[in-house]
Amino acid sequence: MKKIYCDIKKCLGCGSCEIACAVEHSRSKTLDIAIKEELLPIKRRKAQFIDKGRAISTGCHHCEDAACVTACMSAAMYKDKKTGQTMHDADKCIGCWMCIMSCPFGALTRERQEKVIVKCDLCPDRDVLALPAGRPACVEACHTKALFLGTLEEFKVRT
Amino acid sequence: MRYAIIGSSAAGISAVEAIRSKDKEAAITVISDEKTPLYSRCLISYLLAGTIDKDKIWIRPDNFFKKNKVEAILGVRAEKIDTESKEVRLENREKIRFDRLLIATGSSPKLEDIPGKDKKRVFPLRTLGHAVEIQSVLDKVKSVAVLGGGLIGLRAAYALKSRGKDVSVFVRSPQILSQIIDKESAGIMQRHIEKKGIKIFTGRSAKEIKGKDSVEGLVLDNGSNIDCQLVVVGKGVSPNIETAKEAGIKTNWGIVVDQFLKTSDDNIFAAGDVSESYDIALEEKTINAIWPVACEQGRAAGLNMSGENQVYDGTLAMNSIEFFGLPVISIGITRPKKDIYKEIVRKNLDKNVYKKIVLRDNIIVGAVFVNAIEQIGVIGALIKNKVNIKDAEDIVLEDYFDYGKIVNIIKDSKGAFKQKEFTETIMTA
């Protein structure tokens, strides 16, 4: 499936992906307005340091055999059979945090007002899986091209 | 091939889907003593609390059986399993033949043997039926007594408090949630719950339920009297093993299964709350009666029933609970009883933050996190994959701990982390 990969050799841990992600998931989709929104937008991706000088940008990996989907007791988390994406239905989510308990990547965040989970949704407003030139906000914002949207095979032979 | 499945909750449903993914045509019969299965058992306390409507508790569409070409026999109990003739006999005398059988009969609430337990308005909280029954008597109820301070007892207490009732919880153990978390984290949770107006009495149990036909009060073990019009019993569950036991299938606490979820009979499998299987942290067989395990086991059993040879790595105790905005998550062993275990704790009690890991020979075998729960799944990965974390011991409880910090551990483990997404993330490391 198509998803977001991070090249650790290129990642600086600068956090541009985090900001772009939060802005994309804001109401205004504009940084200077987004920071004043009543409910601050939540990033679904984190630049994490591995050791001195090396970093990785981590978000939902849309695991093939997704532990969060198995653990979800309200059927809010599910796999899209066509794209392989791990989807989340906020209407069904009851905020039990079973997915947080089971995600080996720590890729889920609590939205405490609504009491639901937020996670990487591959930027639905950008339609990145359907449009050939479509790119998620984090990939677009990555200065060093560490972040990559594509299949595993495409990631392996990227230039 | 004819498949029969007894039980239609998490394990049963997952097994149906697994079998259908391999075999589109074979006959599948599902037998359930519940008339309306396909709901999430974990959600009934949310329904009782009024947090969700009834239409939100369904986890599969109502045409699930039809769509999967399943003959569903609902509201009927399976009474007997004949392993020789390969038949399940139902309470209505009907017989269901099978080539492969899955026993996913789950567990039943333990009802305390306490005088007065048969009075009206004494309920367990296990099925949708119980939640509906409790709801139907609520207008006659001002005060509620909950017997048991485990997950179900406290969920019931929370639900009824949300309904405006005066709620008291009586817990025989010295702490709440004693099967799930350790004493200190339980103390944090208890103080938080009490602040929100639920009364909790630890080290206290009921000796008698009083009243004419219906509940009017309790007599406690110290002799004092409590007024209440509703009693909810949340004393844990015991596995429904009777039919299997009578059929000569090997049982212990639960139905004993191997790494393929197979019972002592080659054609019969067991999954979910009823199955006693290998526990990754304990390194021995036990029952982990939790939703994720039931789903995993149901799926693995379904695949193996349809001819696959999928090894099920084992179960792990895991629970996630939140009361009034304060969450706690536990994984694996949280209350070690032998001195071969070591504990590391970090806490900030002003912020209700508490984190503990339990280690055995430098391998994490358990964790409890209160409030700061977001990264506990990464610890869960370390528990599941059993890596030596001697060099990382100091950092796993720090605020900055996250997936990035275990990238080197995964790389150095040379394949201990089997899930392919781990390999993908460290490809460029």
Image (cartoon, coloured by chain):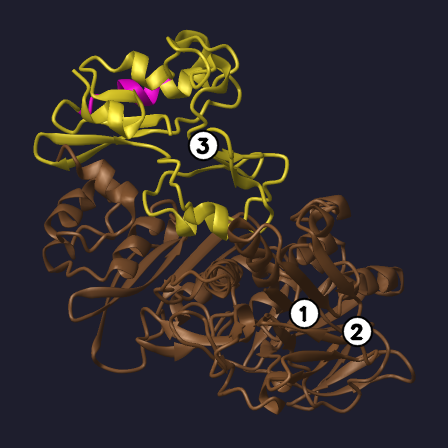
Rendered colour, chain B: brown
Parent chain of label 1: B
Q: Do marks 1 and 3 share a chain?
A: no
Task: From the image, tell me which residue sits under label 1.
Answer: B168
Parent chain of label 3: A
Label 1 to label 2, Cα distance in Å?
9 Å
Task: From the image, tell me which residue sits under label 2.
Answer: B228
Q: Kindly indicate the quadrant of the structure image that contains residue B8.
A: bottom right
Rendered colour, chain A: yellow
Check if residue B177 falls in the magenta segment.
no
Secondary-structure class at tag 2 = loop
Task: From the image, tell me which residue sits under label 3.
Answer: A85
Residue located at (40% from left, 66% from top): B315
Query: Residue A93 shows which numbered tag?
Result: none
Secondary-structure class at tag 1 = strand
User: Identity of the amino acid at label 3?
Assistant: Gln
User: Identity of the amino acid at label 1?
Assistant: Ser
Q: Which residues are magenta?
A: A13-20
Q: Quadrant of the C terminus of chain A?
A: top left
Secondary-structure class at tag 3 = loop
Left-right relation of B255 to B92: left
CB within 8 Å, label 1 to label 3: no
CB within 8 Å, label 1 to label 2: yes
Q: Is residue A116 above or below residue B416?
A: above
